[in-house]
Image (cartoon, rainbow, N blue to C red):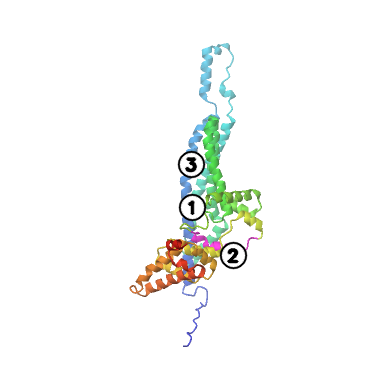
């Protein structure tokens, strides 16, 4: 039989003369990226505005208590004059010295008011720039209503300018960091204020604040050690950036080492998925990162201190299969997972899949569920049965044994 003729793609004679397909898909991509960015930033700014408003109200209440202690109490002068009248001192001809003349605010109250005022100022500044940020995003998404080509290039220039001027880092890192700093400053001022009233009053808040700051420091260390740690905060992003500039910094190294030690006490075994796997949104980034060589400024010792070893791409590929077969109920997704699993030849990937009894049993059950429909549901049922059966037999015969053909409970009885 003669071979079918090769079909070559039709190249456009000039840019944009392909029926508008490239520009159409580009517009969809650009609109999607802009919509995702502005939506995420607006949600963050709205949350900041709500928190900053509540926080400013609490801070103002404490300032109302501490600011009067910065000046003399007029009632003290009144009481002193009344006492002098009662004692008859006023008839001696000497001018009485009032308490307000010798008044100086206590140093601890002065520090407390400075901290409270600084905290309130930071919260107000964060709120102000959050409102400005919403305006920036509004103008960023605004279109001039002119021709499509001009709008497209204008959107591209705005996107490049937003990246050049650091719009996302300012709204997503700097402003939350400013608001969190205000909270820390206020907490320190609160403890000092309670200590001025009585040392015993400050013990409990001091313990809670120390625990909170310790947790923040540990979370930053976790993010330094594990780049996919879910405890990311603006502070962790700032410290991670600084660590990339100064990889040998002893303080950062201590944070990463402490995080590694602490995480070994509280985290689950990373080789057990328990129904969840790596974030699918970050898997492609993870694969590309681990394929690249380390940056020139990092040595082997630095990488071992600062970074948890990323899972091998073969293990991540196995985790993709495990996650789909564990949690998905979509027949199309399961079917294509079985097809791709049958095409895997790497023993490491197959072995990791085989080590998970839940995944293997799900694949077996899918085959057994499709098998009775072989003669009743037509070609679709037959293709599903073949796909699931082939995938199951592929992993069993490649890295398993004949005992794996049995259900887990029967296999354990044999053992």
Would you name the residue on which mark 1 appears? 135
Residue 137 in the image, given as x and y percentages of width and height: 49, 55
* Mark earlier in primary sequence (1, 3): 3
Region of the chain picked out in magenta, as a range:
277-295
Q: Nearer the viewer, mark 1 or mark 3?
A: 3
* Mark earlier in primary sequence (2, 3): 3
Would you name the residue on which mark 2 appears? 291
SS for dot 2: helix
Q: Are marks 2 and 1 in contact (CB under 8 Å)?
A: no
Farthest-out residue, front: 414
Asked if residue 197 is positioned above or below residue 295 in the image, the reply reads above
Residue 199 in the image, given as x and y percentages of width and height: 55, 31
Q: What is the number of the mark on residue 55?
A: 3
Q: Is residue 138 visible?
A: no
Question: Depth check: 413 or 351 in front?
Answer: 413
Question: Depth check: 357 or 287 in front?
Answer: 357
Farthest-out residue, left: 376
Q: Are marks 1 and 3 in contact (CB under 8 Å)?
A: no
Disc 2 versus disc 3: distance between alpha carbons?
Answer: 46 Å
Disc 2 versus disc 1: distance between alpha carbons?
Answer: 41 Å
Asked if residue 177 is positioned above or below residue 207 in the image, the reply reads below
Residue 365 in the image, given as x and y percentages of width and height: 40, 65
Residue 413 placement: quadrant: bottom left
* Mark earlier in primary sequence (2, 1): 1
């Amino acid at each position: 039989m003669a071979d079918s003729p090769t079909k070559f793609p039709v190249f456009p004679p000039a840019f944009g003369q392909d029926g508008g397909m490239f520009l159409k898909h580009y517009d969809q991509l650009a609109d999607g990226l802009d919509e995702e960015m502005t939506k995420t930033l607006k949600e963050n700014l709205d949350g900041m505005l709500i928190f900053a408003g509540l926080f400013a109200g609490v801070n103002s209440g404490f300032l109302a208590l501490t600011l009067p202690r910065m000046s003399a109490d007029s009632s003290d002068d009144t009481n002193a004059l009344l006492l002098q009248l009662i004692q008859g001192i006023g008839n001696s001809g000497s001018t009485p010295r009032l308490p307000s003349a010798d008044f100086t605010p206590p140093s601890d109250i002065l520090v407390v008011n400075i901290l409270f005022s600084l905290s309130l100022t930071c919260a107000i500044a964060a709120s102000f720039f959050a409102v400005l940020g919403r305006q920036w995003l509004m103008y960023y998404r605004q279109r001039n209503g002119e021709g499509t080509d001009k709008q497209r290039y204008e959107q591209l220039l705005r996107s490049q300018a937003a990246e050049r001027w650091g719009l996302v880092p300012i709204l997503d890192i700097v402003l939350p960091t400013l608001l969190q700093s205000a909270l820390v400053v206020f907490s320190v001022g609160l403890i000092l204020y309670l200590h001025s009233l009585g040392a015993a009053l400050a013990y409990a808040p001091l313990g809670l604040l120390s625990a909170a700051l310790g947790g923040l420091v540990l979370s930053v260390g976790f993010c330094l050690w594990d780049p996919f740690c879910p405890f990311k905060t603006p502070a962790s992003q700032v410290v991670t950036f600084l660590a990339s500039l100064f990889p040998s910094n002893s303080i950062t190294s201590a944070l990463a080492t402490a995080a590694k030690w602490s995480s070994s006490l509280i985290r689950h075994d990373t080789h057990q998925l328990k129904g969840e796997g790596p974030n699918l949104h970050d898997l492609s980034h993870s694969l590309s990162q681990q394929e690249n060589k380390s940056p020139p400024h990092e040595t082997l010792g630095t990488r071992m201190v600062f970074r948890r070893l990323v899972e091998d791409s073969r293990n991540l590929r196995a985790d993709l299969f495990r996650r789909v077969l564990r949690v998905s109920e979509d027949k199309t997704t399961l079917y294509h997972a079985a097809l791709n699993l049958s095409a895997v030849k790497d023993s490491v990937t197959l072995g990791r899949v085989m080590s998970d009894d839940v995944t293997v049993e799900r694949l077996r059950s899918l085959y057994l569920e499709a098998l009775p429909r072989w003669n009743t549901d037509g070609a679709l049922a037959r293709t599903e049965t073949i796909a699931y059966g082939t995938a199951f037999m592929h992993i069993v015969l490649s890295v398993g044994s004949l005992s794996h053909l049995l259900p887990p409970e029967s296999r354990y009885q044999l053992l």
